Image (cartoon, grey):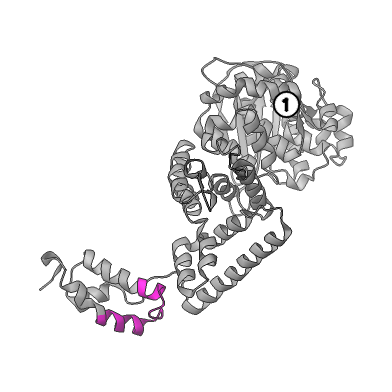
């Protein structure tokens, strides 16, 4: 549904209900920044009255095919979800009654009471999000522009001025704002990265003072806000803010401890935290997902405990990818990632050194096959991570290393095409092995099948049914003599 049409429907309902309704928050901010309306996927409204009751009446005025209402009665709030022709979420609007909030020290869940519009705006995170525009202005015939909004904007905390100065500042005392809802510290970092704004000095100092308050926030909410930050064009802006002000250490201490450089006999290593942040930015520039950026954030966390100075070699981090995988598993559980997300992250952390080692040893067909099979559909993302892992400032080294990955990518395509390994498994299947050997399902069948697959990966035989069968006939007796009696049918 078009934005103008939504505003007209809301204004019509406001007249019927005889109440004032305002568009607030990110919508107002983004229009003032000149962002296109096509980019908007949600709009927040404040109702001077009951937001929930207004939302119910709004929903009743539309057919069920248009969308559906999700209610949050404890907060006098409801979200209306518009659907597209396929029934998928197309656009969301939220109605909330103008309210004041108070907090208990051990919880970020507010105690809510009705209030006027200015009181409602004062509880918001930053001044640039604490501006409102009457819906009746937006529902008119004029095109929605920054100039139109500026004529009737409600801006009690100088949000327009802060937008112009590109500053993030809390409407009220920053210590109160962050203590009440510590998640706002992560939001500050995210908006700094997304908008490329500076955070006001008093607001920054309050972040550092209140970092430990993040303990009252659920892992799910931290996860959600972190991934929004990782989805920005330059996540390092926000990540550095979180680290410098002790917030990152509250939920990702394994990343924070990467900071620093040691020196032995005049030899030092690069700052692994600075390197990590550059890797994450490189992934973002490459179009990688927020989840891939998260894998990039964790890819070197094993370096802290594997760091050694070896005479003749210098600083080493041997096997850091294996320890990193174990630490990443702990972090994924801590931040409540799904099983599929965790499996993906752990795989990339574990294998991110393999392409480098492969190129050092020589890009043989066998080595490429193993990489393809071990990574499966995540291989392309691994290569994005590996390319992003090159953060040298030496143009010659950068060019050479990227050229190596170009070559590896071509070899991968060649092997996939030649061996048809996209869904690799032995062409001589388990049921045929059992029939030929007179075996029940059991470990011996699995061992024979694995031996066939290893032979294909090692290049001993082609990924071909007849060759696999011939090789099976050559090796089967070695396995059958060790089969358990219960596996044998006769």
Q: Dot 1, crowdedness within 10 Å: few (<14), some or many (≥20)?
A: many
Q: Quadrant of the C terminus?
A: bottom left
- Which quadrant of the structure image shows residue 155? top right
Q: Where residue 348 sits: x, y (%)? A: 50, 54
Residue sitting at x 89%, y 29%: 151
Q: Is residue 281 left or right of residue 417?
A: right
Residue drawn where x is 73% and y is 37% of the image:
9
**Residue 189: percent from the left, percent from the top?**
67, 33
Residue 470 covered by magenta stretch: yes
Residue at the spot 47% in from the left edge and 63% down from the top edge: 376
* Of residues 344 and 411, the one drawn nearer to the viewer in this rendering: 411
Q: Is residue 489 above or below residue 259?
A: below
In this rendering, would 261 be left or right of 443? right
Q: Is residue 63 visible?
A: no
Q: Give the residue drawn at x 20%, y 75%.
A: 478
Horizontally, residue 448 falls left or right of residue 153, namely left
SS at mark 1 in the image: loop
Q: Position of residue 326 (x, y in %)?
A: 42, 45
When the figure is inspected, residue 238 is found, relative to residue 458, above or below; the finding is above
Question: Does the segment drawn in magenta span residue 135?
Answer: no
Q: Label 1, on which residue? A: 126
Our reading of the magenta stretch's main secondary structure is helix
Residue 182 found in image quarter: top right
Does 261 appear above or below 205? below
The quadrant where residue 272 appears: top right
Residue 401 visible in image: yes
Which span is picked out in magenta? 454-474
Q: Nearer the viewer, residue 33 or 189?
A: 189
């Amino acid at each position: 549904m078009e934005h103008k049409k939504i505003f007209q429907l809301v204004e019509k309902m406001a007249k019927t209900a005889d109440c004032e309704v305002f568009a607030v928050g990110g919508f107002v901010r983004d229009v003032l920044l000149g962002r296109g309306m096509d980019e908007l996927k949600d709009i927040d409204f404040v109702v001077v009255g009951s937001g929930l009751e207004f939302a119910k009446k709004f929903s009743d005025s539309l057919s069920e095919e248009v969308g559906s209402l999700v209610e949050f009665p404890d907060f006098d709030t409801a979200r209306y979800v518009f659907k597209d022709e396929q029934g998928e979420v197309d656009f969301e609007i939220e109605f909330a009654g103008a309210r004041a909030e108070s907090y208990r020290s051990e919880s970020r869940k507010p105690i809510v009471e009705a209030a006027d519009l200015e009181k409602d705006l004062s509880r918001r995170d930053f001044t640039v999000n604490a501006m409102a525009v009457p819906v009746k202005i937006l529902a008119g015939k004029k095109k929605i522009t920054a100039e139109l909004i500026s004529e009737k904007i409600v801006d009690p905390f100088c949000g327009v001025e802060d937008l112009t100065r590109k500053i993030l500042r809390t409407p009220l005392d920053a210590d109160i704002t962050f203590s009440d809802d510590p998640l706002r510290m992560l939001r500050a970092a995210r908006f700094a990265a997304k908008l490329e704004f500076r955070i006001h000095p008093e607001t920054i100092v309050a972040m550092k003072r209140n970092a430990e308050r993040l303990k009252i926030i659920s892992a799910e909410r931290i996860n959600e806000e972190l991934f929004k930050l990782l989805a920005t064009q330059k996540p390092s802006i926000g990540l550095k803010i979180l680290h410098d002000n002790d917030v990152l250490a509250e939920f990702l201490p394994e990343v924070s401890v990467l900071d620093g450089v040691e020196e032995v006999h005049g030899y030092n290593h690069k700052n692994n935290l600075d390197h990590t942040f550059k890797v994450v930015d490189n992934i973002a520039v490459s179009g990688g997902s927020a989840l891939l950026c998260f894998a990039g954030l964790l890819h070197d966390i094993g370096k802290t405990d594997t760091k050694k100075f070896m005479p003749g070699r210098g600083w080493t981090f041997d096997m850091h990818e294996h320890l990193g995988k174990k630490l990443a598993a702990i972090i994924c559980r801590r931040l409540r990632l799904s099983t599929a997300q965790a499996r993906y992250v752990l795989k990339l952390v574990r294998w991110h050194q393999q392409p480098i080692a492969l190129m050092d040893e020589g890009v043989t067909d066998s080595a490429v096959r193993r990489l393809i099979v071990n990574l499966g559909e995540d291989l392309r993302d691994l290569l994005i991570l590996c390319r992003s892992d090159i953060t040298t400032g030496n143009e010659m080294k950068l060019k050479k290393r990227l050229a190596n990955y170009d070559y590896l990518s071509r070899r991968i395509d060649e092997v996939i095409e030649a061996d048809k390994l996209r869904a690799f498994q032995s062409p001589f299947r388990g049921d045929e092995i059992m029939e030929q050997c007179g075996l029940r399902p059991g470990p011996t069948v699995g061992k024979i099948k694995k031996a066939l697959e290893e032979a294909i990966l090692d290049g001993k035989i082609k990924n071909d049914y007849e060759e696999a069968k011939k090789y099976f006939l050559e090796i089967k007796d070695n396995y059958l003599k060790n089969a358990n009696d219960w596996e044998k049918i006769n």
